[in-house]
Image (cartoon, helix red, strand yellow):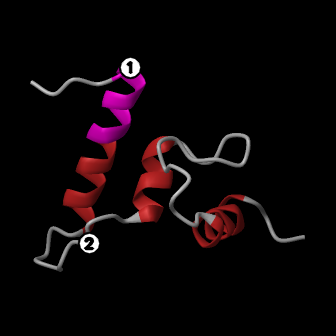
Amino acid sequence: MDDYVSESARTIVETYDRTMADRYADGTPQPDLDPEAWVDAAGGPRKGRVYDFGDNLDTTPVLSSYASLVAPPA
């Protein structure tokens, strides 16, 4: 059994895994990380950060894309 730091961490990972299985079910090659799927699974950015994205990844393109999807155009 996998150990998680919190129940929310477990939920995010399980949601991400289901999302990836749905998105890439047709035999499409699955990337190691789908940032958009992770942002969706994590519930979007909070305080400009995405849960467990870490500081090593440039999240600017993902967060900009996400913001344009959830915010109506001005």
Judging by the rendered image, the residue that carries numbered circle 2 is 31
Circle 2: element type: loop
Residue 2 horizontal side relative to residue 39, left or right: left
Circle 1: element type: loop
x and y, in percent, of residue 27 in the image: 10, 77
The correct choice, above or below, for 16 with respect to 37 in the image is above
The correct choice, above or below, for 10 with respect to 70 in the image is above
The correct choice, above or below, for 72 with respect to 29 in the image is above
- Front residue of 58 and 17: 58
Magenta residue check for 32 = no
Judging by the rendered image, the residue that carries numbered circle 1 is 6
Task: Tell me the amino acid under the disc marked 2.
Answer: Pro
Which residue is pictured at 64% across the width and 62% down the height?
63
Image: magenta residue range:
5-14
Residue 3 horizontal side relative to residue 66, left or right: left
Which residue is pictured at 79% across the width and 64% down the height?
72
- Front residue of 23 and 34: 34
